[in-house]
């Protein structure tokens, strides 16, 4: 039986990918992770809500709105651009273009000077550009994966990428929290040291440096991808290819449910659970900073613990994926993630599990000295252990489901499914927070997305 040209091209690439090419692809996760670890989750977002803004509830609301708007734009563009690229164009130029947005947006976070609320639009616009750049660059990086290893090794490669990404987040967090960002009360870093850079604590230059630091980190570590990882042969962007890609996108949307029912159902399920997962991570650090008054030291150490847990989970999940199947790994990990999220949201300043009273954190106490903080940390570790397998096995399951000639296009749908309603959870969090003036009630809206995605995933017929 003859092979299609696209499949023959993929098989030829598989036979010639050198180890340094695989390393370059894996390092993309390492390069982008500081954006998610330092900016979105542990350092800059809590600083924006509790340091830059004068009202934490209002700060959480507008940060949620900005997150939702940026993710909606990325979701709308992802399948269109993926279809164009699948018309025969290489992926690296697209990654390079969106890298410009990512670096420019991260650099703009430097302008988050506390007390100067006139700069709020600039900071939110910068964050939005960085979000769009990171998400769309990831679409094209993910689409390169099936052309690098055989189907039997996709789970291991994907899990390795997520694990290396978590380690990158861990190392970058240790550097910035341990050597640069200071606690405004003590002037010391997480490691109890004087910062290696003479930064102005009054204007929170350490927190604001998180953005430019993440941009520089990305520029350095994304280079191996461009230098060593093989791509499709370079070709000029032709109008015919663009039109062909857009026509195929329209046709693929029609055919997705009709001919690729398992993929459509999986994308719908992921649309929900990825939205809930992202919301829990985006607002978990913000909630902890508000409830326990955590500063840079506590948030930095909290991030390190969660990142280590995520690394272990991603590596373990990747190995289990190739043995047990992607769907089984995702379902199990989702159950643990939901349990951890419920546990985190059950904790307030003076209670755990919603009704069990505990002593509130005393002023001047040590790191994680109160029972509430310790319980929060334990549930957060459970979240970290399960998040890596969910994310890594999700892209592996799609790679195993989709036909090879539509890889980039379907990964565009993959990004679309992960982001088209990604605005919904942050907006729901912002709306509930604004209506109730309760950050805990606001974040609890994410649970509905997690549970809904899990229920739909159970009906997906996964390949053996």
Image (cartoon, rainbow, N blue to C red):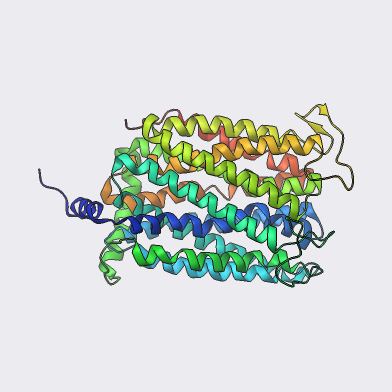
Given residues 360 and 429, the one toward you in this image is 360
Which quarter of the picture shows residue 27?
Answer: bottom left
Horizontal side of 374 relative to 414 (left or right) equals right
Vertical position of residue 304 compared to residue 28: above or below: above
Vertical position of residue 55 compared to residue 201: above or below: above
Residue drawn at point x = 56 percent, y = 71 percent:
104
Given residues 103 and 76, the one toward you in this image is 103
Vertical position of residue 2 compared to residue 457: above or below: below
Given residues 201 and 116, the one toward you in this image is 201
Residue drawn at point x = 26 percent, y = 69 percent:
235
Given residues 411 and 310, the one toward you in this image is 310
Residue 287 location (% of width, % of height): 73, 46
The residue furthest left is 1
Vertical position of residue 299 compared to residue 77: above or below: above
Residue 321 location (% of width, % of height): 41, 35
Residue 94 location (% of width, % of height): 39, 65
Q: Tell me the quadrant of the picture where the N terminus can be found.
A: top left
Residue 419 location (% of width, % of height): 51, 50
Residue 423: tell me if it is visible. Answer: yes
Residue 68: tell me if it is visible. Answer: no
Horizontal side of 433 relative to 358 (left or right) equals left
Residue drawn at point x = 47 percent, y = 37 percent:
316
């Amino acid at each position: 039986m003859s092979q299609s040209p696209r499949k023959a091209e993929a098989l030829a690439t598989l036979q010639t990918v050198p180890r340094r090419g695989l390393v370059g692809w894996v390092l993309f996760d390492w390069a982008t992770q500081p954006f998610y670890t330092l900016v979105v989750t542990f350092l800059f977002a809590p600083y924006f809500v509790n340091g830059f803004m004068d009202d934490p509830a209002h700060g959480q609301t507008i940060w949620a709105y900005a997150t939702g708007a940026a993710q909606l734009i990325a979701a709308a563009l992802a399948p269109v651009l993926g279809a164009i690229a699948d018309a025969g164009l290489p992926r690296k130029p697209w990654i390079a273009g969106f890298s410009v947005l990512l670096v420019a947006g991260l650099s703009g976070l430097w302008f988050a000077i506390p007390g100067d609320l006139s700069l709020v639009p600039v900071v939110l616009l910068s964050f939005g550009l960085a979000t769009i750049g990171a998400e769309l660059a990831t679409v094209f990086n993910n689409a390169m994966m099936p052309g690098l290893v055989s189907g039997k090794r996709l789970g291991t490669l994907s899990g390795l990428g997520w694990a290396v990404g978590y380690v990158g987040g861990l190392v970058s967090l240790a550097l910035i929290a341990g050597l640069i960002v200071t606690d405004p009360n003590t002037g010391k870093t997480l490691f109890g040291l004087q910062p290696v850079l003479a930064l102005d604590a009054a204007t929170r230059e350490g927190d604001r440096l998180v953005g430019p630091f993440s941009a520089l980190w990305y520029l350095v570590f994304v280079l191996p991808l461009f230098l060593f990882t093989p791509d499709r042969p370079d070709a000029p962007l032709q109008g015919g290819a663009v039109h062909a890609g857009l026509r195929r996108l329209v046709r693929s949307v029609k055919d997705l449910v009709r001919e690729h029912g398992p993929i459509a159902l999986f994308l719908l399920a992921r649309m929900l659970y990825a939205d809930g997962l992202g919301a829990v991570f985006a607002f978990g650090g913000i909630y902890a900073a508000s409830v326990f008054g955590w500063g840079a030291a506590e948030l930095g150490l909290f991030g390190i613990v969660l990142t280590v847990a995520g690394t272990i989970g991603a590596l373990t999940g990747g190995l289990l994926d190739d043995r047990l199947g992607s769907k089984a790994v995702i379902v199990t990990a989702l159950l643990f993630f939901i349990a951890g999220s419920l546990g985190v949201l059950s904790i307030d300043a003076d209670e755990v599990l919603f009704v069990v009273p505990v002593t509130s954190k005393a002023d001047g106490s040590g790191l994680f000295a109160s029972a509430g903080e310790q319980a929060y940390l334990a549930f957060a570790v459970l979240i970290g252990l399960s998040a890596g397998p969910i994310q890594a096995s999700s892209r592996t399951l799609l790679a195993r489901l989709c036909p090879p000639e539509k890889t980039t296009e379907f990964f565009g749908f993959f990004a679309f499914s992960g982001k088209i309603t990604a605005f919904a959870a942050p907006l729901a969090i912002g709306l509930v927070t604004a209506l109730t003036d309760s950050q805990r009630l606001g974040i609890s809206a994410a649970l509905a997305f997690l549970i809904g995605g899990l229920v739909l995933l159970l009906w997906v017929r996964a390949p053996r």
